[in-house]
Image: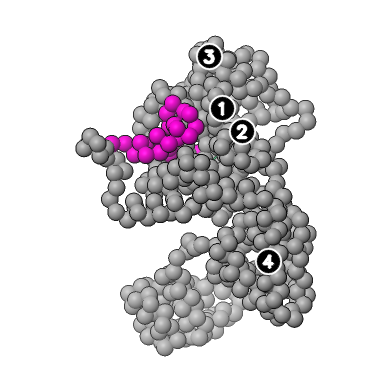
Amino acid sequence: MKESSKAELLRQLPAVDELVDRPGVAAQVSEAGHELAVKVARALLDRLRQEIAGASEAVDADVARVEELLADELKAAVNYSLQPMVNATGVVLHTNLGRAPLGEKALKHLVETAGRYSNLEYDLAAGRRGKRDQHTGRLLASVTGAEAAIVVNNNAAAVYLVLNTLAEGGEVVVSRGELIEIGDGFRIPEIMVKSGAILREVGTTNRTRLADYENAVSERTRLVLRVHPSNFRMIGFVERPSLAELVALGAQRTLPVYEDLGSGCLAAAAQKGTFDEPTVEASLRAGVSVVSFSGDKLLGGPQAGILVGKKDLVERIRRNPMFRALRVDKLTVAALEATLLSYQRGAHDEVPALQMLLTPAAEIARRSEVFVARLRHHLGASPAHIEVQEGQSVMGGGSTPEQFLPTHLIAIASPHLGPPQLEARLRQHRPAILARIESDQLLLDLRTVFPDQEETLLRALVVALAP
Ligand SMILES: *Cc1c(COP(=O)(O)O)cnc(C)c1O
């Protein structure tokens, strides 16, 4: 772009006050308020000036376009960025979509306690300061059978806290096959370095024997670590000692055994479903000293890291000054307490993620058929091809990688809209809808769609499929 045309463009840009007063943005300015509108307009004009100055090609900066940009930015400035969505992917614990959705009971408890003062850290019986641990601790002990329990921000924090408390400056023995990366950069060896513990890896990637652990234990050893390789499976020529063998080794050498279980399936849930996941209770029964797992994976609660195990060790971990930095707030305590209370009462259908996972394929088939009949009715003579086919849902959330759940999928093909275009239209809808594309088909899995979202989904599809 020539310098003379740049100068011309810059001259044409409206002044801040002039732009904010233009009728084209009056509605958005009124909603955002004058002060915010001026701030956003100034930043926008600054950005455009820089863009024009540095441009090698033509820049569209006429007043109508500038107004349009300001209107969009003002709308975004006063609207929520975090918003509810329709998850039609069939991935139940979708980390990018907030993992486990909370149940009605959890939401109610959260609203009731967070909108008022609560006894978060107040002992009502004694009339003095209490501990926030009490609310979830009693339920975790009762539901899992553990001697003691504490809760931190997430399981990554729990892993850090255990390693730092029990093994700082000493060695942690762990199998090479368990040095995993969870995703988003959470790697066992790296968290180990940060915790101040020294990694003592034993065995090989695919085979580690009890003797490998025995040979590695020395006076420098502080902890035996077992990690559930939750997001991948090793098959074939593989071997690792049982938990009971590790526990026996720990007892013989007076070393605690810590297991990072990842997903944290409780036995009650495992009995109801055919989840191929180790349970918290089984680990505790095997004698593991401390077990940690996530609150928002298979448990179906809020983001949290749950630590259960032997009283003396859990208390030591609780006394680590870092516990204060990693503790949960009252929103989490409320949501987790309610979720655990559902387990305590055996009311698993109150936990949405569990309910979704336990819905039989036949039930999803029935819902899908009814939905498709309604959709066809609304679409009238539309040439879109819609059918219900067998498929698989995914547990997700770094749990049970190879375990898929049989489901029924709604496959949609439109003669004038490719699957990526249709997918984009649904994603741009509000509330946004996330679908799956597989073998050149757009697929919807009602397993993860709440029944009260079906109407939204239906209407969005009718609009998206319009020619
Ligand atoms: C998911 C997972 C973590 C991390 O848990 P967050 O709650 O996401 O922090 C750690 N270890 C294992 C084995 C996991 O599966």
Whole-Å distance between the Cαs marked 2 and 4? Answer: 37 Å
Residue where numbered disc 4 is placed? 370
Relative side of 431 to 215, left or right = left
Mark 2–mark 1 CB contact (< 8 Å): yes
Q: Is residue 137 magenta?
A: yes
x 48%, y 61%: residue: 82
- The C terminus, quarter of image: bottom right
User: Eyeballing the image, is 103 above or below 203?
Assistant: below
Q: Quadrant of residue 57?
A: bottom right
Callout 4: SS: helix
**Of callouts 2 and 4, the N-terminal one:** 2
- The N terminus, quarter of image: bottom right
Q: How crowded is mark 2: few (under 14 residues within 10 Å), some or many (20 or more)?
A: some
Q: Which amino acid does label 4 sit on?
A: Val
Q: Which amino acid does label 3 sit on?
A: Ala
User: Eyeballing the image, is 449 above or below 324?
Assistant: below
Percent position (x, y) of residue 395?
A: 64, 47
Residue where numbered disc 1 is placed? 283
